[in-house]
Amino acid sequence: MLSVNDAEAIILNLVQPLNAQRDIEVVDLLTADNRILATPVTSSLDFPHWDNSAMDGYAVRYEDVQHASAEQPVILEIIEEIPAGYQPKSTIQPGQAARIFTGAVIPTGADTIVIQERTRREENRIFILAAPQPQEFVRHKASFYQAGTPLLSAGIRLNAAEIAVLAAAQCPQLNVYRRPRVAIFSTGDELVTPDQPLQPGQIVDSNQYALAALVKESGAEPLLLGIIKDEPDTLQEAIAYAIANADIVISSGGVSVGDYDYVDQILESLGAKIHIRAVGMKPGKPLTFATFSTQNSSTDAINPGFCTNAINRVSTPDSSLYFGLPGNPAAVLVTFWRFVQPAIKKLSGVTEGWKPIFMKVRSRDELRSDGKRETYLWGKLHLIDGVYKFHKAGGSHSSGNLINLAKTNALAVLPIGQTLISPEEKVQVLHIGNL
């Protein structure tokens, strides 16, 4: 039985990001939210595009106003008004100024902006009542970004700020990595779908719904294969289909040591290399991780240019990763958060932010374990007086108890050998949701 850290290292070392030459598709800017940029961005535009004013006021020559004060104001002639979007027609000469508004182009000859609060206007004359700093409130051309230099790097997740940058750079279409495809199915003769009436001994398959939601949250595309009965031939057919059509396969149930737990032997019969069969954690001990190698003949090249013609490449995977998760619902979620989610994120092509996020916080509650395995207790992080604290979910922390997993955003981790964490004592937590 492997330690949690060893299992994590094996899994994440075997995960290879999507292929930057093949696994690329083109999306419109308005549909690019939460996608992973596949090629770097270089713009032909300077930002700002020209020298412009950061404030409403007057464009002046610093030489004219450097000694201005309320007692001895400098009086300048206003020769032009420059709103945003207007190209100045005049050159500012000694003794002259232009009325200017935020974002407007600074006219030739001016080098400083005096804000309107430090002036008094009388018809076409402006009284400068305080000396500005040299080049004050001037946003210089290319001071934010210089054309031809890297703007956005490949491997970043596109959120609102990045999309705004791309819009400003006039990139209406983007090269992004395709979403990883994740096949999901549940095993067990006792399982039924939520719309079926329950018979004695049956339970609803909640795992497939939870896993589909988690896969989408991780930025991947779920491929739902339903409930697979505990029949070796049927199960083998489902696994063979899944590994041929998905980058990652997730099954729940069938990986323990029961008479009807067939997953491991079927994986071996299909040529899988099984790297993990059990992990020293609670919940989640029966965990299978395996890899399949496949052939991919696509050699078409992607155009590396950005904001230029690009080609969709929807390929079959070079290899498939198989996660055989336990059947109990709490164990399914804990093992997904601990191992599967970072694997999906790394596979997606993101260069950072895919590793599990751990925090040291104080526990509001007493936390206990038997100390025999690394133990995960679910609950919620609360911000109290500017400090995050962990509050354990009430009720049983049995691997079969799904109910108190609601509203969970963190897992407290008790290492092997530690049986007690007292209230207000620090504990390591795995952050799994929104704070």
Image: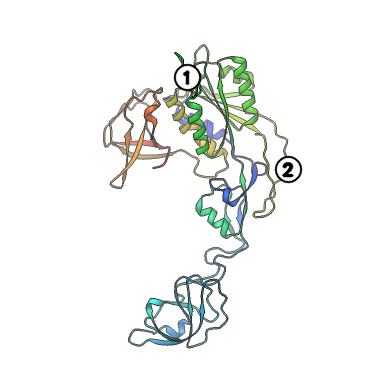
Mark 2 belongs to which amino acid?
Asp
Residue 326 drawn at (x, y percent): 48, 23
In the shown orientation, is residue 434 left or right of residue 350? left
Cα–Cα gap, marks 1 and 2: 51 Å
Dot 2 falls on a residue whose secondary structure is loop
Residue 271 drawn at (x, y percent): 64, 22
Residue at 53% across / 13% down in the picture?
260
Q: Are marks 1 and 2 in contact (CB under 8 Å)?
A: no
Neighbour class for label 2 at 10 Å: few (<14), some, many (≥20)? few
Q: Is residue 415 visible?
A: no
Q: Against 29, is 427 above or below?
A: above
Residue at 46% across / 15% down in the picture?
199
Residue 307, image quadrant = bottom right
Q: Nearer the viewer, residue 39 or 330?
A: 330
Mark 1 or mark 2: whose residue is earlier in sequence: 1
Q: Is residue 305 visible?
A: yes
Q: Which residue is mark 1?
A: 197
Dot 1 falls on a residue whose secondary structure is loop
Residue 247 drawn at (x, y percent): 61, 33
Q: Which residue is mark 2?
A: 300
> Quadrant where the C terminus lies?
top left
Q: Determine which of the numbered discs, if any, sits on residue 123 in the image.
A: none
Q: Against 348, is 305 above or below?
A: below
